[in-house]
Structure formats: C-alpha cells, structure tokens
Image (spheres, coloured by chain):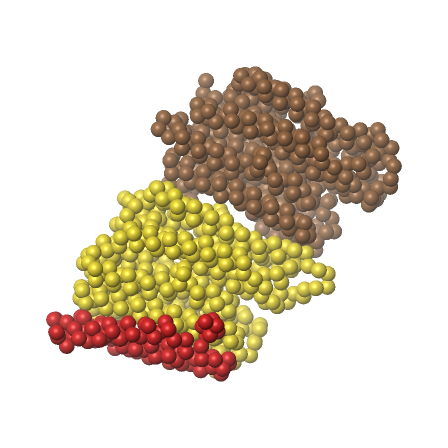
Chain colours: A yellow, B brown, C red
Amino acid sequence: MNGSALLPWMLVVPLSWATGTVLLAHRRHAYTHAFNTVGSLLLVALAATLYWVTREHGPTTHALGGWSAPLGIGLRADGLAVTLVLLTAIVSGACGWYARTSERTERQGKGTSQRYFWPLFWLLITALNGIWLADDLFNLYVGLELLGLSAVGLVALGDGEASLSAALRYLMAALLGSLAYLLGVALVYASYGTLALPELAGLLSREPITQLALALMTVGLCLKTALFPLHGWLPPAHGVALTPVSAMLSALVVKGSFYILFRLWSDVAESVVTPLAAQALGALGAGAVLWGGWQALRESSLKMLVAHSTVAQLGYLFLFFPLAVGTGASAAALATQGMLLHLVAHALAKSAMFLASGTLIASVGRGGVSDLAGVGRHMPMSLFAFGLAGVSLMGLPPSGGFNAKWLLLQSALAGGQWLWLIVLLSGGLLTAGYVFRVFRESFRDPDPGGGRFTTTPRAYDWVALALATLSIALGFASRSPLAFMTNGLAVMVRGQ
Amino acid sequence: MNGVVTSSGWWLPLAVLGSSLVPALVIMVLSEERQLTRTALNLTAAVTKLTLVAYMTWSVARGNAYELRFAMLPGVDFVLRADALAMLFAGLSAVLWLFTTIYAIGYLEGSPNRSRFFGFFSLCVASTMGIALAGNLVTFLVFYELLTLSTYPLVVHRGTTKALNAGRTYLRYTIGGGAVLLLGVALLTSVAGDVAFADTGSLVSLIAQDSTMLQLIFWLLIAGLGVKAAIVPLHGWLPVAMVAPAPVSALLHAVAVVKAGAFGIVRVVYNVYGVETAQLLGVLAPLAVVACFTIVWGSVRALFQTDIKRRLAYSTVSQVSYIALGIALFGPWGTIGGLMHLMHQGLMKITLFFCAGNYAETLGVHDIDELDGAGARMPATSVAFTVGAFGMIGVPPLAGFVSKWYLGLGALEANMPWVLGVLVLSSLLNAAYFLPIVHRLWFRPQLRPWPDERSFGTGETSRWLLVPTLATALFTVGAGVLASLPFSPLRWATLISVRVYTQ
Amino acid sequence: MSADRLYAYVGAALVALSLYAFLVHTHLLRRLLAFNVMGGGTFLILVGLAQDGRGPDPVPQALVLTGIVVAISATALAIILLRRWFVFSQATALPEDEAQ
C-alpha cells in the first residue's frame, strides 16, 4: 500500500460526507445515522491504515490532482501529521456516536438547526485534516478559515441567545485572527516568493520584515488558540455549544491553530525566532494556566468549568516555546515530546470530560456544579469517566497527561528554567482543585426527596469511558507514539 | 529496550497486581443488588492474591527474581520487581487485605454505594501492591498517586458534609505532598537518570560533586512521603480522616496509606540513596530527630482524645514514626527494628481499629468513657483489643516488644543513646493512653445502657466482624512469640538488613 | 513609486483604518464591514508587495481569488448569525460590549 495514494482520501471522504449529509437532510433519521456511522468507521480505518503505512515506509507527500506547488495543493504526511489525523478520526468518531445517540433519544425537535449539524461536522473534519496535512502557508490559511467557520456554525446550533452571542464573539475573533495570519503570509510571499513550508525552512532569515510577518501570524494564531489574555471568546463558545460540539472544539479545533504555530516556529522559522519572544509566549502560557485554573475554580456551571479548564490546559502548550528556543538540544527535544504528548492526551481527556459532563447534566437536568449532589450514586459510570479524564488533566500518573508533564518538567530542569517548573506544578494543583470540586458535589448525599435523575443512554457512558481510557493508556505506552511523532521534525526539536 | 523484557516469570508481579485491579473494575460496573457475586469476587480475589504472594515470597527467599519492565517514557521504564523488601510489604498487605475485606463485607451490610466502595477498595489494594513491587522511583510515584486517587472516594464514602470536608483536607495534604514528591523525583532523575531501586542504593558516585543537591532532593522526597507517613507537622489529615467507615480507617492506618509513606521512606534511604550514602550525606540524624519528635508528640496528643478512633489515629502518628526512626538509626539492628515494625504496627493497629468498629457497630459506642463494662458484653473483642493495646505498649512477648527491643539495640549501635529515652518515654505514654481503656473494659461496671445496641443472635457481634479481629490479634501474639521461625517478620527483616549494608 | 507599491501602501492604510474601526465599534454590522475592508486591504498588500518590481505574478492573484471566496463565505455566515441574533435579542451589539 502506498501512503501517498491514501492522502487525498483524508480530505475527500469527509468532504463527500459533508455533501452527502446535505442531500440526506430531509430524509429519515435512520438513513442519516447509518450514513454517518459508515463515514466515521471509514475515516478511522483510513487514518489507521495511513498511520500504519507511514510507520512502516516513512513520510510521504502528494500533489492533489497532479498540480504541484505553487498553484496546486500539496499534502505532506509525516509522523506528527498522521498521528493527528488518526486522533481526529478517533475523537470525531466518538463525538459523532454521542451526537447520533442524542439525536435518536432526545429528539429535541430543533428541526432547522439539526439539519446543519452533520454537514458542519464533516466540514470541520475536512478542515482539520487539511491543516494537519497542509504543506504550504496559504493552504493552512484556507484550512484555518474553513475550520473557524464550521466551528462557529456548530456553536450557533446550541440553545438560544447565549449560543448566538457566543458564536458571534467567536466569529469576530476567528476572522481577526485569520486576517492577521494572512497579512503575515503576504509579507512572507513578498520577501521570499514561495509559501511552501519545506522551501521556506531553508530561506527564512532574521530580517525585520520576516520578523514582522512571523509576529503577525503568531498573534493571529494565538487569538485563534485562545491564548491568555486573548481567550475571552473561548469559554462561552465551548461552554454553551452542544455537548459533542464542545468536545470537538476543545479537543481538536483549538489545536489546529496551535499546530500551525508550532510548525512555523520549529520547522520553518527556526532561524528567525528569538528566545525573548519565546519567553514572552511562555509567560502568556503561564498566565493562561493560572488564570484559567483560577476561573475554573470559581465557576458555577459545570460545562463552563470544563471550558475554563481548556484555557488553562492550552497554556501548557505554550510553555513549549521558552523551553525549546535557545536552550540546547536535549531540553528542546524533551519540550517537544512533552508538548506533543500533552496535545494528544488533552484532546482525549478533554473530549471525554465534556461528554461525561454533558451526560451528567442530561441526567440531573440542570447545569450547575452544585446541582450534582447524588450523581455519584446514580451515574457512577459517567462520573468514573469524568474522573479518569480528570486524572490525565491533573497530570497525575498513570496517564498521558502525567507523562507529558514529566517531560516538560525534565525539559525545564535540563534548561535550568525553574520558573516554568513552578508553573507546571501549581497548574497541576489548580486542576486538582477544580476537578475535585466536581467530585465533592457529586459524592454529596442528596436530600431525601430532592433531586430526580433521568436515565441516560448507555452509549453516552461507553463513548466517554473509551476516550478517557485512551488518555490513561497513553500513560503506559507513550514512548513509541512519541518517537513516531517527533521523527522527521526539524533538528532543533529532535535533539541528538 | 522497547517492549516487554522478560526475566524468570515476569507475569507473576503482573498477576499479583491484576488480582485486585481486575476485580476492582468488574465490581465497579456490577449493579448494587448483586451482593453474592460481589462478595464471592472479593473473597476469591483476596485469596488468589494471598496465594500468589505467598508463592512469590517463598520463591524470592530461594533467590529467584521476578521482573516486568517496559519503556513508559523516553528514558524512563515502568518496572515491577519482586525483591525481599517488596515481599515484606506485599505480604503484609495481602494478609491484611483478606481480613479487611471480610470485615468490610460485614460492616457495610445493607448500606448504599457498596459497588463503588468495594471497587475503590480493591483499586486501593492494587495501588498498594504496585507500591510494594515498584522497581524504580517513577513506578513508585505512579502507584503512590494512584493510591491517593483510589482512597478519596473511600474517605468521603458517607457523603455527609463532615466526610466531604475530611476528604478535602485529605486531598490538600496528599495532592500537595504528591506534587513535592514529583518535584523531588523529577530533580533526582535530571541529576542521576532513571533511578532503579538497588540493594545498596545507586547515588554514591554522585556524592562528591552534587552533595548539596542530593540533600535538597532527599528532604523533598521525605517531605512528599512524610505526608502519607503522617510525620509531624504533615500529619493533619489523619485524625480528620477518621470520619470514614472503620474498614477504611483500618486500610488507611495499617494496610495502605501511612504504610505507603513509611515504605517509601525505606525505599528512598536504602534503595535509592543507599543507607551508607545517606549516612555520609548526614541526613539520617536529622531524620531520627524528626521521627522522635513525631513519636512523642503523637503520643501526647493521643492522651487528650476522648473519641476512640481519634485516639487510635494519634497513636498511629506516633507508631508509624518508629519505622522512620529504625531506618534513620544507622546499623543493622535499627534496620531490623524499623522494617519489623512496618509489619507489627500493621497487625496491631488493624486489630485495634477492628475492635473500635465492633464497639461502634454493636453497641453504638464511639467515646472512651462509654466503654465501661464492655468487656463483659463483648469478651472476645475486648481480649483482642487488650492484646493490641499491650502490643503497642511493648509488653513482652507481643509483637511491639520485639520491635522496640531491636530499635533500642539499634540506637545504641548508632551511638544515639538519647533515643532510648524517647523509646521509654513513648512506651510510658502508650501505657498512659491505652491502659485506662483496658481498665474501663474489664474493671468498671456498666453504668448506662449502650447508646445504640444491635443484636446478632448468639454471638457478641456479627461473625464477619469478629473473625478478622481475632485472627489479627492472634497474629500479633504469633509475631512476638514465634519471632524466631522462618518467614516471621523478624527473620524476613534480618534477611533484608543483610543486603542493604555493604560491610 | 510603482503602481504595485502604491497598492501595497493603500492596502496597509486600509488595514490600519479598519482595524481601528473593528476595535472601536460595537455595532456588529460595522465590525463586519470593517472586517471586509481589512480583507480588501490585505489582498492589496498581498498582490502589490509581491508584484512590486517583479512584474505580474499569477500566484498571489490566485491566492487573492481564493481569499475573496473565503471572505464572502465568512461574510455570509456572519450575516446569518447577525440576523438571528437581532431577531432574538433586538440588539445590534454583543451583551458584553453594550455594557461598556
């Protein structure tokens, strides 16, 4: 099997399903559900095959339709890209299953908005795969816009006014961020005459215009990744969206823009970035860890709590920059491994946590943290899934989150940067604070008579539990996925 | 390096772990009503584990090694390994788990949330087994944190505000301690690489250039472990956690949590630093001082408690530090005393907690001054309590006496005669807070009716509660009287102490 | 100054002006217009700077075409959301902004 031949299908399949679900929108639910199940399974199978093939035969590229750069769309599959494609397939498959179950059982009768869910869902996956596999700056821009627009559309499908205002706020941030990025792209093209990532990697030099371009792109991408203090749009958007949407947004969508930032800084503009700028990004990341954690501690609504937690967890990703830039090969290698592992572990754990929270809320009928009294008895499985996900988010072993934190700690020690060490540890304590706040309420013995619980579908629990278990399992087997992900990245981050 | 490296029987440590991990997961998904299945599963698992551990102990004594190793992270392996010290702790936990399970089944009869309880109960023991069998510091840390997580639902089991507050206090201490421990382990790994447990430690080569750093790391590790081992001033969670049901208290005090902390200190001193390296670094004497302070302070506080379980809790604070003291006394006698007390304290304290639970469940008695005349109503339980209390005081020939004797020898050997004074003072204090209880049990007439008496047919209390109590009391006597037999705590501790000293 | 460079300068001025408008105004339609002007400015920079002194270049023109398509889709989505928001709340600004 040839990996190169598989690549276009990672875009063609979700795009076809997006079109297909538009056509099926007025048919019976059963058809749509069967169609979507097939699509999810197909995507997982293709992504797994691509993962396996790339492991065996190494990275591949593909020029769509035979058109090569600069006018055509080039695709590139290295270990990192392929891992994220597989991650997307798994998480979206799980969220899709959850969404289907909820449509089948709840039938909220939101006819018109329901129609848009599946096309947007598949477009979102197309955009994500487009970003993971893109090989030039402009296709990244198109992916970024497509991602933003489909995500905004999905947020708007939530309930009532709150979801509309959240979607609008999100849209404004997304548009502004994309344009800042595009301005950077324009400057790069004007200076170097190409946008292909591999070519740029060799060309870029530390000139003011290049630095301006990089700064613009970085600001735009930080806005889209909701880096503190540009994070204001995220908690409402992730907090009010439909449960499976929240899960996909926190797990995958914000990672899209961060992925571009990472590729830019480490693969392409390695010679342009300065340690000072990296320290600044790290400081903002630290701000996110502390501020997001603090907000989550004080939050009264369960889904908003989980959304604030996303702000905090995204902060850890940004610690990569000060740990990796200008610190030496071994510290940089550890930072890269830790950051990438955190990205994957957070995707699995956070999607599990959102799905479990949605189930708890569905059972209780209200969304407050303090309404949870007694769910420990009635919803043990959902709470267990929430707990497993929480373990990974807190960075407690055994979990992917712990391994990631460990690697980041080791990187901070190798580079002699004690400050980030303190941020990592106190972030973990804050996370423990808000996760156990939820448990404290859940274990509370309910007043007799008060608190009725609706039975929720079993599938809800299995989906959340599966994702949470994966985030724990990653704690026992991180070495080989890590080796695969970092294989083929730039020298700075690969280490010796 | 990649994949599973096998030595003779890598599956056995895994089976020991699995024998409580798998039941834990099955029990959690079991519906609340299936009591018979749950009980059968619990007991089968406990017996299976005991058999496996017994076989492994016997085999390790004959010089066999068991190891499971795979790469968990770049540069860090996940290692399960059975050495003599591991089997000391695993053996203790396996034996006591069986009895605590039986006791818990009787204790929780008819109460809600039993699937959750027994699920986390088993998970807790799985973590303890992992702590015992961990072959390097990172693996130890993994299970140490897992223990925190699996005990939290047990502490807050009753769901009352009091229990929830206790749970919060418990977490503040243990999660904070875990973070300090993580920092220590991470620092040590950055200095010395992946630290595997070795008989005489592995840091002696670094002592020349990094001694200050090694000292700092030592105290970080001890602080992190000291939270669970309830070393003053990190002990605050232990008395508060008394609101948990009696079997949980037994688990916290005798089988799992405080023992995990004490065992961790043993590992750090002997198998990470090496006791001779630790002596060279000059960290043992301060540790001995801290331990002695805890011993006296815990006993003094115990004197002023009127609640039975709270008095027992402060007694634990005091008694667990005997282990740390034994470790800190440089020389084989101190080592033997400390290690042996790890076992002995477990046997005696679990007996006392079972008794406290029996009084509470049968008579509704929680306060010491309500115990007048309980000896006549519940003679078997009261005999067990008396045995446990005398053991704690160190009356010959019971288990506690053997520990204290060796600790005394160790103090002389380590050239710290003032420790003898501490031991005598502590024994006097032990007597001062235990003897009044024993006196009330046997020599005072019952003045008031029992607060909340339940009848259990012909016996003085439920058989599920009584059998484990008597069994552990019997062990307390046996460990003292039969100390010279093979596989006794004394003999096993001697075996270990031979290995940790190079000369 | 070549015409291409002029385009780029005008583009830069447009971006600056519209960024100001985007940040200052709370009326959602105005912000949307500001975004569109900003997009136009960016496209001018993209083509102008790239062709400055090098003659016509098909690549930036193709990019701008794609960019225009994306901008139109974004505008369409924004207008749908805006209308719904107005119908729901009778407001022309987001609640957080109105408070200011």
Which residue occupies 59% across, 23% down?
B337
Q: Quadrant of the N terminus of chain B?
A: top left
State which quadrant residue A54 falls in. bottom left
Could you say where residue A228 lies in the image, as x and y percent from the top left? 41, 59
Left or right: where B211 falls relative to B285: left
Which image quadrant is residue A343 in? bottom left
**Residue nearer the viewer, B414 or A129:** B414
Answer with left or right where residue B231 lies relative to residue B101.
left
Q: Position of residue B95 (x, y in %)?
A: 64, 35
**A107 or B320, nearer to the observer:** B320
| Image vertical order of residue A448 relative to residue C66, above or below | above
Residue A333, percent from left and from top: 32, 47
In this rendering, does residue B355 appear at all?
yes
Residue furthest front in the image? C100
In the image, what residue occupies the spot 38% across and 56% down?
A284
**Residue B469 spot, x, y in % from top left:** 73, 35
Is residue A487 left or right of B350 when viewed as pictured? left
On screen, residue C72 above or below A95? below
Point out the image quarter for the C terminus of chain B.
Answer: top left
**Along the line of sight, the residue nearer the viewer: B244 or B195:** B244
Please name the residue shown 69% across and 27% down the image. B430
